[in-house]
Image (cartoon, grey):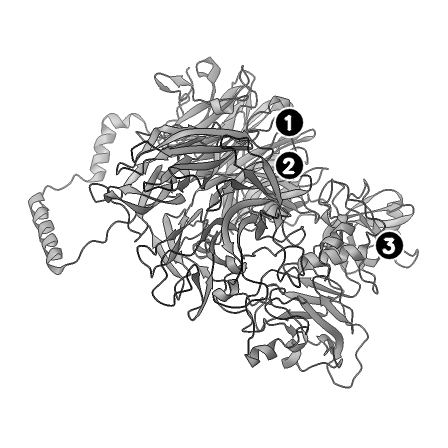
Amino acid sequence: MKKSLPLAALAAVLAATGCGEVTQAEPGPGDTFNYPTGIGVAEGKLLVASSNFDLRYDDVTGGSLISVDPEAGDALRGSLNIRSFAGELAVADAAACGLPSTLALVPIRGSNRLYRVPVAADGSLSCTDCDIGISSSLFVDPFTIAVACAPGVARAYVGFLRSSLAQAWVTEVDLGQDPPVLRHRVFGDGRARDFAWDAVRQRIWIVGAGGISAPLRWVDVSGGCEFGPTVAGETADPALACRGGAASSALLPTGLELRSLAFANDGSGRAYVTARRYDPAAGATLGVGAADLGGVLLVVDLVEGIDGVVRIVPLRSMEIGTGAAKVRVLPARSGGRRDVVVALAAGEGVLWIYDDETGDRVHFGRDAITGEPAVGHSAFGLAVDPVPLPGNVGRVYVGSFLDSFVTPVDVPLDDPSAASIPQAGGGHRRITGGTP
Amino acid sequence: MSTARALALSALAAAVAACSGSQNAPPGPALRQPSAVALFHGKTIDAPADLRPYLAVASAARSEIALVDASDGTPVLAPIQLGTLVVPAPDRPAILAAASLGDDGADLLVVASDGDGRVQLVGTWTAANAVEDAQAADLGFDVLALAAVPSPAGTARVAAALVDGGFALIHYAREPGGPGISLTSFAVQALPFQPVSLAAAAGDGTHVWAATRDELAPGVQGVAELDLSNPSGPWPVRAIDARGPTRLVAAVRLQERTDGSAADDDAAFAGQPTVTRVYAVLDESGCGSGKRIDCGIAMLDPAAGGLVPDWPLSAPAMPYRAPLRLPARPLALAIATPPQRPPPTNPPAAGFMRLYRGATSLVSTTAVGAVACDDGSVYFLDLGRFKVATSSSPLAARPGGTPSATYSDGHRIYVRDPATGAFPPDAEGSKHVRVTPGWTPDDSWSILWQGTLAGLGSRAAQAGKTGGQLWLALQTNPSSEVVAVWHPAFGVDRDPVHRDVAVIQARGIAGCVNATDLSAAAQFETRVTGLLPPAPEHPGGALLLEYSAGADGCMDGLSAAADAGVVGKLTATVRAGGLVLTGSSVGYAGRPQLDQDFSLAYPSGGEDALAALCPLADWEGPPAAPPACTGSCTRAVCEQLVLARKVRRFHHLAETCGTEQACIDRWADLPAATAFPGVNGPALAFRLGVQPQVAGTTPPSTPGRDAFLGIRSGNSASLPSGVSRLTARPSAAVASHPNGAVAFDRSPQDAAAGYRFFVSYPADFLVDTTPSLESVEVRILR
């Protein structure tokens, strides 16, 4: 038998030939997505944060934030190199948040930074010292992010992947100050997987913190209270601290790990939740990471009971498949109709569109013949344009981490069952970057 | 290794295997995320010429239906027998239904997928077993549930619950002269409510029952009955009041035992008529100890249009028969009726089925239910005796009741012998705590002197003044964390002797500091003198506080601050003035008084009379305004209602002590007027006193704050009810979230196997179980 060519030698050969055209010192591409993790929409432009997950490009400049105009042939509107290992992306709208300009917010794990990138009306991006450190000795790897804006309130909330005691730390970023003031608060076991902002009650909701027993936590940030101390781990002044609580999940079946939360447009307390099913008994033995038994999209009401505790009252449960991920609500519809909701089952690569008015739902799953998911492999990142397109069409974007593209999905708000993926080149339209 | 050598080794291995007679295990059904299961008689490639019973199991993750031979649990293999035969079903099949056409042909089998409005026909009459695309009924709305409806010979009907409040009836018929089945028609009707589950009863082709969470008529929640007399509709709807919303339903025709009978055999059913019963799982959002009915499986009588009356009929205690209560949340429900062939050993009388209660105790009954719950277990129901099947008699042991208390400062709270007033030795304390089988629930009880009222510890609070009176509201502000203290469920201000106490923590009140830690909140307390009804500044009501100027600096400061407006950022705890009984599950359970008999018991007049007097008990809290409570609506009446709802009957006994003296002695303290099995009695009854540690010394008239008496059994933290439910629990590591159940009579193929239940689990397996054998058999098919 011939001796195999050692892998190191093979790598050397490849590096010396055509494969060596990209080196790790080069910045990431400014016009194409590369392992996208964060998606957002600002000023009608699609913002995509790429992670440079495989470190094909330079660690410090290998990531990117790219702005494209999907309604103008995916024209490139802005590009910025950022550090590798971007997390999610949130948009702080200038008008809604009372800020001088709209901000794209991208946490970076590994280097523990938070980018606050101004986005101009034309989608162009700018950055002057726009990243800040965001970690402590107690927690690292910022990843999850959401924005909470209301009159007098302009804040971002950041969740972390790791902490020294496996606790769910959340950092509040006051966007109205420069440099922003950071305040920190811990919510028990777990990690913050998602946030949702209840603007009516001025409560920020945290999903996943508090472990299995209290999977939905909230903090009332009204009235000028303090989210937490500015130094993580210090004791908050109880006289100034924002009040918080946990929703009772007693009415939910056991064995549901909540993953994402979105509130209805009408401010009624109606909410939509994705959850992963697991076996509670096996989970107790093996940890929360017990097998994924499939995901559900729950329609719930969050209502205070006579004891003043918020209860999660389930109204409907729908199967969505394994890998339950983000859920988001499309813009409000006319005539007092209830919401149109999108939910992602990343494990099976299925995007669900649910009409809470009729109860109907449609989905984009895998091709019956090829098995290819319509929204790409490792679906990751879900964003909704807050402004409907002409014709009252809601626009949803779904990222594919492994395929490095974003799939636009059009959802007619008057007939969500007619949702479609725009076609291009004989197949589904896929946005892989911006056209310079 | 060269190919030739590998082939040679492979051949050798095969030869060795053949010589030794060993065989590879046949492949299992290879399920992936099973989502539903149905049973049909049809043809497959296994037996292309014969009609045999098969299970159809929907595998959502693979968008296919696997077929399993129901007679032995083996999968139907593909033509190349390396894998199982599957029927492709597009887009995550989620719901299955099967129905006999009442002739000699194959059964109907239909499937609906997640988020799909089409009900598709699966070919059961040929071994091709394909989904017949041309025979799909496109109902226009997503399908939520399906149920087969008994139909004339040669036809079949399937009822469908649709989103957006729709109901459809789909008609199928045997093809003329052929074995095939074809869709003949369907009709859809809009309903004023959202059906979520459907059921029909064998032998009744004119009714379908629908579970719904919606109100069916003003004040009526339960199950809707649709009259299908007109084949094409419209189908009139009648509301059957279950006193709460429902989410799962099943139906059967059966005999129920006679009043007063505790016979284990068919004698219990002598002369009883066959009746239709609808079993509905109550939705947890509208049932429980604070609602009009407990959670569980309600038993409905469609003929009477409501819940079945309480049993015993000769001495009912409740206005309705208690729901079948389970320790977990039901997710799937199936009912088996007596099998065609009796088992060869210990056969029951003709027309009955056997149900084992432990390895040696056997009963005969008329229908058995299997309830798959979110804890992964399957619980069995003896529907003929309208009870949860148990693995032992609840009378076999007295369910604890052992009081436990330690001495503090030379005294403790302890039970007295109600006859003599003396304190019994600790070993005999349990004799003086009365419990009643079927009424005393699983709970852990605590009795504390000036204990914190359940739910009212360390709550955010605001204080203010109305008409010069100082009040305390448990709320962050009028729209957040509002505790409805006006609601009688909290039992505030219900001690006729001792005023409740409000313990307040506050900062920044002039003249009020924490003497030991200036940076900490000051703590002070005062008595509660009454309640204020809800008002805009305190929408849950408020506690009126006792205040005497100059008596307490903190109260003076609070009063002064309240003069200027509502004082916020307080923390408050409400403590009882005297003794308070609390159950870890039921919460507030009343106010025992020292040296007086206390009985926590369901009222002899039932709860409805009290509910009519106290609409306040059904108040959902703010922002809704509370119902008026004046005149006959008194706090005392409301307290009775609140407590009555916490100690309802939860289990119907089907046993007596017979002549067993030990059992008779064990329960000798039950009232003479009551008898097993139809026993009525208190959930908990006792008399308490303050016992000195040293006999002959005089204890204080009242114990110290938080003096504690626990009532429990042995080392257990709870007081067990004595009801040991018969359970099948799969041994698989991941066994939860069952999602489908179907009953099957295997006796034609194997009389000893009896009736079976198949339950699907999303962790890629199916359970085959039965309680008809000496020990509950659980087989896993994966």
Q: Residues within 10 Å of mark 3 (few under 14, many from 20)?
A: many
Q: Where is residue A383 in the image (x, y as percent from the top left)?
A: 50, 28
B782, A266: nearer the viewer: B782
Q: Which residue is drawn at 44% across and 36% down?
A: B157
**Mark 2 sits on what residue?**
A269
Is residue B535 shown left or right of residue B336? right
Residue B700 position by quadrant: bottom right
Q: Secondary structure beneath disc 3?
A: helix
Q: Residues within 10 Å of mark 2 (few under 14, many from 20)?
A: some
Q: Residue at x 68, y 76 (%)?
A: B432
Chain ID of residue with mark 2: A
Chain ID of residue with mark 1: A
Question: The disc labelled 1 sits on which kind of residue?
Answer: Cys
Q: Residue at x 37, y 37 (%)?
A: B154
Vertically, is B218 above or below B519? above
Q: Position of residue B118 (x, y in %)?
A: 43, 30
Residue at the extreme top: A72
* Quadrant where the image shows the N terminus of chain A: top left
Q: Where is residue A370 in the image (x, y as percent from the top left)?
A: 30, 29
Q: Secondary structure beneath disc 2?
A: loop
Q: Distance between the residues labelled 1 and 3?
A: 43 Å
Residue A31 position by quadrant: top left
Q: Distance between the residues labelled 2 and 1?
A: 22 Å
Vertically, is A102 above or below B528? above
Find residue B555 and name its label: 3
* Quadrant where the image shows the C terminus of chain A: top left
Is the residue under label 3 in contact with that under label 1 (CB below 8 Å)?
no
**Mark 1 sits on what residue?**
A97
Q: Are dots 3 and 2 on a single chain? A: no
Question: The disc labelled 2 sits on which kind of residue?
Answer: Gly
Q: How crowded is mark 1: few (under 14 residues within 10 Å), some or many (20 or more)?
A: many
Question: The disc labelled 3 sits on which kind of residue?
Answer: Met
